[in-house]
Amino acid sequence: MAQATDEFHFSPRPNRASEINWRPWSQEAFEQARQTGRPILLSISAVWCHWCHVMDETTYSHAGVIDLINREYVPVRVDNDVRPDINQRYNMGGWPTTAFLTASGDILTGATYLPPDQMATALTQISTYYRGNQAEIASRVLEARKRAASGVARSAGELDAGLVDLILDAVKSAYDPEYGGFGNAPKFPQTDAILLLLEQFVLRSDPDLGRMAVHTLEQMTGGGTYDQVEGGFFRYSTTQDWSVPHYEKMLEDHAGLVQALALAGMADALDRTTGYLDRVLRDPKTGLYGGSQDADEHYYSMDAEERAQSTAPFVDRRIYTSWNAALAVAMSSPFMGKYPAKPGDGAGVHHLLESLFKRAYRRGEGMTHAEGVGGQLGDQVWSLWAAVRAYQHGLGEKWMQVALDLAAHLDDRYADSQLGGYFDHAGGDELGRLGERIKPIAENSVAAMALIELDILAGDPSAPYRERARKALESVAALPQSYGLMAAVFARALDRLRHAIKVSTRNPELAHAAMVAHPYAVVDPTGDERAVVCVGTICLAPVSTPTALAEAIREASRTRA
């Protein structure tokens, strides 16, 4: 019991979930299932998840359920944030996920939250079926594995330039003109869709796109999905008008939303949001940000005075590399005046990056995901992009060397040498369905954006990072047709492949002006006090003022078009 309590996070409220003989995801757990002939009960939870806590307090605290699980199953508990690769393969539509597996880790069936009576019935029926139908189960498993094996090839396609317009049209079609956001209920922020609108607003000089993005952010920050007392966004709204949220707050969500607020010029909301992050999630000693703050409907219904007398919801202090790196990329926006990227600024992106890479980076080995957990694709690509941005901000040549090393590690450990693109984890742990190779569209798109910028800066024909970026996008190019607005991150990457430009200058004022004038401007800090704009191998005459630079960027954009 004590071991389970120490190793796993249960609801902070009274419960008996620790009386279940939970095992971590491990070879030992799978071996026990094989030796005993029992199925595996896989519970995927999250520290911040309200219904995970409810299941701990109800279903996993029911004496009959506890007894059935301990007698008939090998129970395995996994945290979604710690092991996103496991969640990617086993999630049953939300959290908590309740998955019933064979001893080899193949899925029998599953659900999300199950109340005690339904859980007891399922536990009895599935264990009985498992013992008596091994031949039928083996046949079903074989068919499922065949389908999974062809998934990587089916995701690949050609890079049609019209895909950007297709995805942008999907975003505009889903836009809610009354309440902002996209679709009906439940309504998620869809930050990449907002960022796509803001970037295309600048590139196309289309004010309607900017209005959609700003209206969405204003509705979110002005309604119930935003904490009007302490600041910060709740995870999503259960209603179309953003009025009834799910109350957890995630660093993952805030990284994109901070960037969106900065690009939209919403200074007050940006200050309130970064104020929450710095005050609640940030460790002042390291400058790193914890992963989340728990949902607590009662606490968040209080006013400021009542909250001051109460205990705030639990904060997960674990440091997730990808989320911190994504926040560093957001802080590198030219509109983030509060977070200058200069050395010595304890609250700035420089301090964040130094602490993050000291903690998670080893040369030749890439980035770890969290303490004691090996790297995932998201950690590598977001950290690569953050290192590239650090170099652009003039933080030193070492960041270019880090970026080049991470790019090499990415290709060595994650790349598909046959079809291009990158798998979601580097291998090593092949238990259960982890042997299945998956290429996520989001991480491959982020990889492409980072590699495009690295290619422009490195200028090394022997290391064609641009071609790697193209292959990463080609490896998932069949997905946007069915993903709709969920492919917004892909559109952002594909458009950069076509329209990114280079601005060489070591003048901070001109570097800032370049990033404001063009969302895909890549700044080479090795230039002189003037600025030179280049598109491919064509470079324009040097300019010395922000106004002249903006005009040069417009001319270069017309040249590329």
Image (spheres, rainbow, N blue to C red):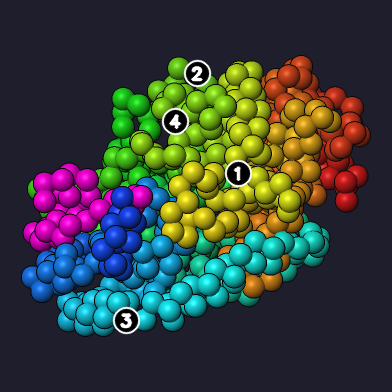
Q: Nearer the viewer, residue 73 or 495?
A: 73
Query: Which residue carries the number 4 mark?
Result: 360
Structural distance between the alpha carbons of marks 1 and 4: 18 Å
Tell me the tag on residue 132: 3
Coordinates of residue 121 in the picture (x, y in percent): 21, 82
- Marks 1 and 3 sit apart, C-alpha to C-alpha, by 40 Å
Place residue 382 in its image quadrant. top right
Q: Which element type, helix, strand or loop, lies under badge 1?
A: loop
Name the residue nearer the viewer: 314 or 116: 116
Q: How many marks?
A: 4
| Residue annotated with mark 2 | 343
* Residue type, mark 2 in image: Pro
Which residue is found at the position 71% from the left and 46% from the top? Answer: 417
Label 2 Cα crowd, 10 Å radius (few <14 / some 14-19 / many 20+): some
The disc, 1 or 2, on the residue closer to the chain's N-terminal end is: 2
Q: Are marks 1 and 3 in contact (CB under 8 Å)?
A: no
Separation of residues labelled 3 and 4 (CA atoms): 47 Å
Which mark, residue 414? 1
Of mark 2 and mark 3, the one earlier in the sequence is: 3
